[in-house]
Structures are given as C-alpha cells and as structure tokens.
Amino acid sequence: MGLRDAFLGWPVVRQVTGTDPLGRGAAAQSAHTAALRPRTATADRVVQSICPYCAVGCGQRVFVKDEKVVQIEGDPDSPVSRGRLCPKGSASEQFVNGDRRVTTVRYRRARGTEWEDLPLERAMDMIVDRMLDTRERTWQSEVEGKKVNRTLGFASLGGATLDNEENYLIKKLFTALGAIQVENQARI
Amino acid sequence: MAECHPVGFQWVMEAKMRGAKVIHIDPRFTRTSALADQHVPIRVGSDIAFLGGVVNYILSNEKDFREYVVAYTNAATILRADFVDTEDLDGLFSGYDPETASYDGESWQYAGHGQEAGSRGQDPDDAGETNSGHELGGRGATLETSRVERDETLQHPRCVYQVLKRHYARYTPEMVEQVTGVPVEQFLAVCEAVTENSGRERTTAWVYSVGWTHHSTGVQYIRGSAIIQLLLGNMGRPGGGIMALRGHASIQGSTDIPTLFNLLPGYLPMPVAGEHDSLDDYVATISEPGMKGFWTGARSYSVNLLKAWYGDAAQPENDFCFDLLPKLTGDHGTYQTVMDQIDGKVEGYFLVGQNPAVGSAQAKMHRMGLAGLKWLVVRDVNMIESATFWKDGPEIATGELRTEDIETEVFFLPAATHVEKAGSFTQTQRMVQWRHKAVDPPGDARPELDFYYELGVRLRERLAGSTDPKDRMLLDLTWGYRVDEHGDVDGESVLAEINGRFETGEKAGQMLPGFTSMKDDGSTSGGCWIYSGIYKDGVNQSARRKPGQEQDWVAAEWAWAWPMDRRTLYNRASADPDGKPWSERKAYVWWDQELDDGAGRWTGYDVPDFEVSKPPSYRPPAGTGGPEGLAGDDPFIMQADGKGWLYAPSGLIDGPMPTHYEPHESPVSNPLYTVQASPTRQIIKRKDNLSNPSAGEPGDDVFPYVFTTYRLTEHHTAGGMSRWVPYLAELQPEMFCEVSPELAAERGLDNLGWATITTARTAIEARVLVTDRVTPLHVGGKVIHQIGLPYHWGVGSDAYVTGDSANDLLGLVLDANVHIQESKAGSCDITAGRRPTGPALLRHVEAYRSRAGVSVETGNQQVRRVPGDVVHESRDRA
C-alpha cells in the first residue's frame, strides 16, 4: 500500500470524502473487518430443519462447519415462517452448543448424595433389568375377574418435544410390555 | 399469540394490513393486545359465559348463516322428549347422578335413538358407551343416524336450534358483563365485529391456546367457539375455523401418534377391560353399522395397526392379536400416576423431554412422586430439575425430604437435539414436516429413536425363548427397522411402517397411497391410518420443500398434512350445497361438472376433504351407513350424521352444550345458576391437594385474589430448553408477578420489590411488576384483582436462571372429559416481601390453612348450591 492509499484509506478521510459522513458504515471498516465473512458463508453445508420450540413449525437452516453447528437461521423457503424466527428459535444454536449441556450418562444410586459416571452400555442393561424386574413383580393378568394383561409398575411421561417416529416406537414398545401409563404434555 | 407464537402472528398482521379486524380477549394486555384493534380484558374462568353470550346475540338477532346452518349442521335435528336443560334444572342437565358425580347421557340423544326407538336402548350396556369421555379421543361418538328426524324450518320446539336458543337466552350482554367483567359496549362491539365479518363473502377465525383448555370445563370452552363458528358458517372455509395454537414442536403429533394412555395411533381408543374382550366388541364401540362417515372404517384401521405391530402373528383366526393388547380400567392419566407414585404403587418412571418437577400443575406432588419411585430414567438435553430433585429440590430446603433418605435410583441419559437426528414434527395445523440430520449427537447423547429401538432389542433378547404368555406380546412384535453402519435406526423406515403397505397380492411390499386403500382382512398394514399417504409412492412426502414463494397461498407442495394431505378440514363446506363456492372471494374447493368427461369432480386449491367423485346431488338410499351414507351435501364426513354439531348428543360427559360454571376456586358466586362449579369436575381429595375456599364458603376472604399462569416469548414451558440458553436466560432472568397499580396500592407492593403469593398448597416469591397491563374488573358488584404469573422457573442449581415455580401454587382438579388440570384459574393471597425459607415456609402455609379453615373436605363439594342474586325466570317452567 502506497502513501497515497494509506492516506486515503485513513478512516477520517474516508468519512469526510466518502458516502458515509456519519462514520457508521463503510468509513469505519478496517481491512480486518472488510475481510470478515459470516459463518453462514463459510459453512461446509446447510441442512434444512424445523424449529424445536413451539408448534408453529418455522423452517430452520442449520449451518455446519467441521461437523459442528455454527449457526441456525430462519428458512426463507418455508411458507409457514418465510425466514423468520422468534427469540427462542434464533437462540437455538446456543441450545445445541450449550456450555452446560450434559453429554455423558450420570447415575445417582439410591440414597446417594452425588452423581456418578456410568457407561452408556451398562446403563442400558441396568434399565432393562429394572423394567423386567418391575414388570414381573407388578404384572396383572386380571383385575376384578376381567382380563387386563398389564403392569402399572412403570410409567412414561414425554413425547411432545419428540419426533412422530419416536412416539410411535414408545407407544408400540410400552404397549407390548403391558405398560399403559404412557403420557405426554398434551394432557398438561 | 404475538407472545408465544410470534412467527405465526405475522399472518394475523398480514390480515390486518388487508383490512381484517383483530380482537384480543385475554385477562392481560400483551404484545398481541398492543397490535390488536380491540383488547378485551376478561375474568379468568368466565369464557363460556362470554361465548354463550355471543351465541345468544347471534340467535336472538338471527345473525346466523341460515343456509349453511340448515344444510351443514344439526340445527334441524330433533332431540328426545326426555332431555331437560340446565335452565330447567338450575345448572344440571337431565341424567345427573350425585352419587357418581356423572351423567347418564341417554336422554341427550337425538329423537329416535335409544329407548324411544326400541331395541337398541334396551341393552343396559349401551348407556355407558355414549358418554365415556376419555375413551372417545378424537373419533367423535357412535350414533345411529338412519332414524334422525329433522325440521328444516327450525321451528320444532325440540330441534337443536330452538334448544340452543333457550339454553343461552339468559346469556345476555348484561349477564356477560356481570360474569366476565367485560362491559356491555365492549362485548357488543365483539359480537358485531364477528357477525359482520361472517357470511358468504367473509369469514372469521378463532384462535385459542391453553388459556381455554386449562379449566375444569376446558373442553366446553372449545365447544363454545365451535357453536359460534358453525352458526356463522365459518367452518371448512378459508380464513375460518378454530385454531389451537399448540406449544410444543410436535405436541400435535404426539396426540395423533399418541404417547397418551387412552389412545392408540389415529385416535383409536385403548381397549377397556370387560368392554373390549374381542376385536368385534372393540370395533362395535367405535362404529355402528347405521352410522355414516369414515369412522365406519374402524375395523380396517384397527386391523392395519395390529398387522403393523404384530406382522405374521396377526391373523384373522386370532383376532389379529387384539387379545395381546393391555386393557384399561379407568383413568390412568399422568395425575393418577403421580398419586400412585406418592403412594408407593409405581416403581419406575421415564421422563423424556419433560420436566414435571417445574412444569406440571401441583408440581410439589410430582416431586414427591419422583421421590417415591424405585428407579427413574430422565432423558433430556440439560440437567433439568426433575433429575436433580433429590439434592436441590424445594422439599430438601423445607426438610420434608432428605437426600440420604430418598430411595430413587436416577439414570440421566443425555438426549440428542433436533439437529442431531432426522425425523418429523407435526405442527399446529396437522402439517408434518421432516427435519434432516445436520450433525452427530455429542458423547453419549442419543436420539429417542435409537434409545427405544435398542431397549426393545435388548428386552426381546432377554426374553427370547420365554413361554410365558405375557412375553408373547413383546416377542411377536415387529421390530425390524433399517439401521445404518453405526447401528442407528433410520427414521424413514419407521415412517414407512406408519404409512402402511400392501402385504399380499401383486402390490405386496408397496406403500399404501392412503387410508382408503386399507383392508380389514390382513392384506394391508399401517401403523397410523390418518398418516397413511405420508410415504405415498415410496417418497417421504413430509420432506417436500418446494419453496413457498414458488407456490400459491395454500402451498400444497410443502411437507404433508394429515389426513390425505388436506390442509383445511371439512373443506366441502367451503362450497354451497350445490357445490358452488359461497362467493368468488371465498372459493376454495368446489364441484366442477366439466371434469372427468362430464361426470364431474370436486376440485380447488386444496385436496377435497370429500369423496372426489360424489356429486352434490347424491342422496344415499335410506339406511345406508359408512361413507356411502354421506349425502353430497354432508361435509362433516367424520361425524356420524355428516353434520357439524351445534349440540353434542354424545361424546362429552359434562353436557351436550357449554354451560358456565365457576372455576373450582373462585371468589365469585356463579351468577347464572346456583350450582357453583362444574358438577362433573374431577375432584382429588387428599391432604397434599387442599383447595382454597370459594365464594360463600367460610374462609373465602383469606384467598381473595385470582391468579393465572402464562408463558413469555423468551422462555419455553418449564425452561428445559430455555433457562440453559444464555441469550434467553439473560432476556428473562427472574420470576415475577404482574399486578395492577390498584392491587399494588391495596397490598403495599412496590415495583421491582418482592411479593409472596400463597395458596392452600404453598407459597412462592416473585419480583413485583406493577403495570396497567392487568386491570381490576368489576364483577357482580365487586372488584376482582387478577395476578399474572409466568411459570418458567424452577428451584435447582444447574440452569443459568432459577426461581420459584408458579405451578407449585396450583391444586389439582381436572376436566372429567380429558383429565386435564384447571391451571389457568386459581385463588390466592399476595403480600409484600419475600417468602419464609426452610421449615418456616411450611408454618406460613399452615397458618393460612388454619385461618381459612381448610380441610380435605372444604372447597371440594361436588355440587355446591350458592344462593345467587340472579332471578332464574325459567325455573317456573320446570
């Protein structure tokens, strides 16, 4: 950069001589800021999704770089939302990448005072043990002479934040286990 | 709507810019009110009086859309002679049994049905079927229609139109003011706006949310608006309808493909012990041979579900394994389960993306329930309060629970977020939208799909070879889903099962194009009949994403809506009886005689919600049931008589027409009837669920104020997805209460100071926001102050922001139709300053109980007659 360019590139000169007399746009831009690119422009790929909060069902575009979500924005193609998101939907990148998100299995034993670590595989087996044990001990073939084929020994709550396919598997599996106390937010 | 569904609200603003009038009826002034033409502050719990007042205005001024009403609703249908209205029994309908606090709805039927008609009614089992609320789900109610009598002049004293007119005659503008606190002029302005904006050329929409459903009479609130919309001809037409704005991404989907105790997929009921011992018994309670409409396909829908679940094991000879299904014996809803947990009857619990320790009414009972378990599995993205109640819950602070004594074993399993898995959400208009997966979940986090699939695999491995009959139901289950190289389940293979396929014949293996292809002989299968067609042609229709800007306003090529990709239900009603649009302006679906070489066909902007080749002139031979029984001008194809129901002859257990009762806890005496509160509300008498005294009971002055709960734009329900998000936590950091300047003065509350709010259950503290967004209302000669409470915070230690939960204040009392709690109207006291902590909190609440004389019995009388000051002119007729 020559002297002339250095002088003309000086922000005050650009402010006085350029199209930005208030110095709030192009005049304030440095070489560094001029070179900045939005995360949405440098993403490796964009994936179409749907906002996870309320049931309006706004379209989302998920920007991924190096296998990490780097930004989530509204999807302009959606006839529902036309690219808009509310404060929750706009903050959903933080929901995905939250600092306090727990990503390992935690276990609290009966009467325990602290969490402990537990491998996922082991946790799955322990849950299966408990389901079968409870089911075996609380099984009802009949109630007041009427056939019922069920257990009231364990129950489930949740589904409104899950996918249809997930709800389908929960209902199918629990019904097959005879566990009828399956509920979700729709009754709340 | 602008607060909780802001992006949806853009369409309301679009309509407003094009000249629509926007009216907001809400106890509080919100962002919606700020953008509305009229804000109508209303007393919580009084909406049925308001809606009934609108019905009365329409009928007494003959503002109904008569041609629509006569042709498309049951206005002309004649009722049985033994039906007696609340006007004549001072707040009760005929058939009430005080012993069971329930109705025998037999006398509510259409004339010609039941005992009057002979054979059918003589079966004593019939009566029970007509009003078993929670089992009806969304399927309407069985009804034999071949003998329906109609008077299309609407003059017969027992026709629905006249019965409705008498029922609401006393819901005058003056009465509305007395009950709701809405001044007569304001109320009439709403009536005029709504009626002027309905008819051939214009339509009006009603939008509601849990402000209507969370009441002991919640179902009847919705019925109230259904009556208005049918009278004004606003159903099945563009710009009309009643829209439920639902608050979770797929709460609609989790009702359609239900994780609910009383339903199977597609609103089929869960079988009941003793009533449904065989598939024949079961189907008979859903449909009857004489009934019109598509519910007569119930056998086919049920067989397809069983075939999807039990595959080759499901054969005609064994009732398609119907016998394997577990059976209900009553209410097994979430609140019943929680009480059973407290009482030590439930050992295990799965919480999946749900935080009841904060988000459910009477949250303390939920926490005590968790402490009564042997084992608990919490699957969530964040370490929610329902997972940590054992170390930092409010009951640890009060000393009611001790960490070292709590036996509950807790497994916290991290869940995947919405971008870490592929799957479908069903949004609030029944539209199913597919999400593609963006990245893998971190660490041990897994999608629910993988968790439940894996659980099923392991359970089946453990039980393999078992000869125990109870294990057959698990071992015979179809559980072979497509998995990728990492062992992750492909959600599309589950969606394909939901859609259904041809099992035999030349199309064997191909996807069903829709539920009308389902057969009841086992030759087809499909996990949820109303979703059949979502995988039509082997293509995931919910993943369609033709940009909205390249489509017309219906945007039919974006995603897929159940049933059969219809975007507006009952859209046959958008055309007149002859099949022509009611007006060019409101054209949507119509009959075009030119199509199909002159044979004619229904066409339009949407998929017709009608048999496409059935002409408007079609009349079925007498006695024809099923779809063939629907005339060419019967638009309500899921109703047993093809008509929209102004009056519900069956399907509801608390009455055929909405009737105003006060909330369970109310400082106001019911001005309309001496019966104070809903005579069928589900009261739960327990020491841990005490009620505040209501008007006219001793101690009613101890809890003189009304409170209601709500959401904020920046948070989501119990906060599991928002209090851990820094931006959102910062935007709304702290629990607060909204009070009017008048109440603040009366109670010495300072803006930004603290207040303690107390009920017979507990006390919570909140920052005070003194604001004229809440206004005192004049009701029946007294001033009613209402307090607004957001409910997003909870007591714990992991979220960025914590605080007392408004849900702790609520008692449990339920709508008997659906077992949903009354959480939008309660009574309380409010005082300045922070609440006591530790055991002192318990003493504080106990002092209130003692002052109000609260016991397990008080406030809990099923039918309490309060001498009102309203003259019941109609009583003379009784």
Image (cartoon, helix red, strand yellow):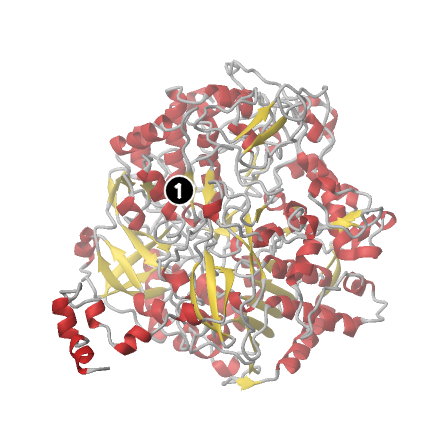
Residue B382, relative to residue B498: is it above or below?
below
Q: Residue at x 62, y 18 (%)?
A: B149
Residue A186, relative to residue B620: is it above or below?
below
Residue B516, relative to residue B589: is it above or below?
below
Residue B668, relative to residue B453: is it above or below?
above
Q: Horizontal placement of B414 versus B455: left or right? A: left
Q: Horizontal placement of B235 versus B632: left or right? A: left
Q: Nearer the viewer, residue B112 or B256?
A: B256
Few, some or many residues within 10 Å of mark 1 (<14, 14–19, 20+): many
Image coords of residue A152 (percent x, y): 66, 63
Q: Nearer the viewer, residue B287 or B336?
A: B287
Image coords of residue B360 (percent x, y): 46, 60
Q: Nearer the viewer, residue B776 or A142?
A: B776
Q: Tell me the kind of residue under disc 1.
A: Glu
Q: Nearer the viewer, residue B60 or A25?
A: A25
Q: Residue at x 76, y 42 (%)?
A: B281
Q: Is residue A147 visible?
A: no
Q: Quadrant of residue B142?
A: top right
Q: Is residue B221 visible?
A: yes
Image coords of residue B564 (percent x, y): 62, 42
**Residue extending furthest toward the right:** B317
Q: Quadrant of residue A1?
A: bottom left
**In the rendered structure, the residue with mark 1 lies on which chain?**
B
For mark 1, what is the residue? B662
State the SS at label 1: loop
